[in-house]
Image: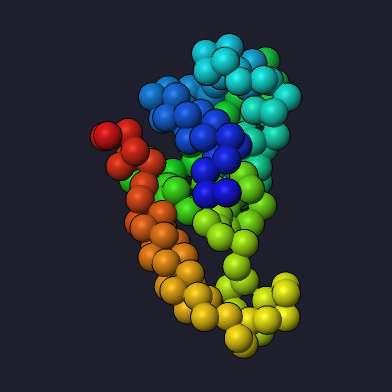
Amino acid sequence: MLITRASEYAILSLIVLSKSDIPVDSESLSRELSIPKSFLAKILQALAKNGILYSYKGVNGGFKLAHAPKDISMLQVMTSVEGKAPSVFECAPAITSCPSDKGSICSIWPFLNKLQGKIDSFLAELSLADIMEE
């Protein structure tokens, strides 16, 4: 579940918004990126609620980046739109919170936990500016 459609659309929207000095409304973004307006509106609201975007109301309203692209991490973006930290596996972050109550006998949990930690670190260090340079 690492990169869902919501995360993809959030990143694409942030790239477009980073190139504008003025707020861009959700309808314009929806048309430009061919994203359903209602789905995009929820994504943009989540990004604004989590301080990644500024939201402006009114005739000239819309959304604008709240930070420089170098200061917006992909972990922040993905966590904002998904409502939880992205995970590669359906594995619990701690042996004691394993949903199957078999964490104490799971032989692959240490590996999966270490891998998830590396992915989290990578996403925390990867900025919007990095994505735009690719």
**x then y, percent, for residue 118:** 38, 65
Q: Quadrant of residue 56?
A: top right
Q: Inspect this view and state whether residue 10 appears.
A: no
Left or right relative to 99: residue 14: left
Of the 4 image quadrants, the one containing the C terminus is: top left
Q: Inspect this view and state whether residue 134 appears.
A: yes
**x then y, percent, for residue 38:** 73, 24
Residue under the image location 41 percent in, 60 percent down:
119
Residue nearest the observer in this picture, 106 or 17: 106
Residue under the image location 34 percent in, 38 percent down:
131
Left or right relative to 117: residue 107: right
| Total tally of numbered discs in the picture | 0
Residue lying furthest left in this view? 133
Left or right relative to 59: residue 21: left
Residue under the image location 57 percent in, 49 percent down:
1
**x then y, percent, for residue 113:** 49, 72
Q: Reply above or below: 101 against 85.
A: below
Question: What colour scheme does the image use?
Answer: rainbow
Left or right relative to 18: residue 38: right
Q: Quadrant of residue 44?
A: top right
Residue nearest the observer in this picture, 128 or 111: 111
**x then y, percent, for residue 73:** 42, 50
Q: Quadrant of residue 21?
A: top left
Residue under the image location 32 percent in, 33 percent down:
132
Residue nearest the observer in this picture, 113 or 71: 113
Q: Reply above or below: 23 against 101.
A: above
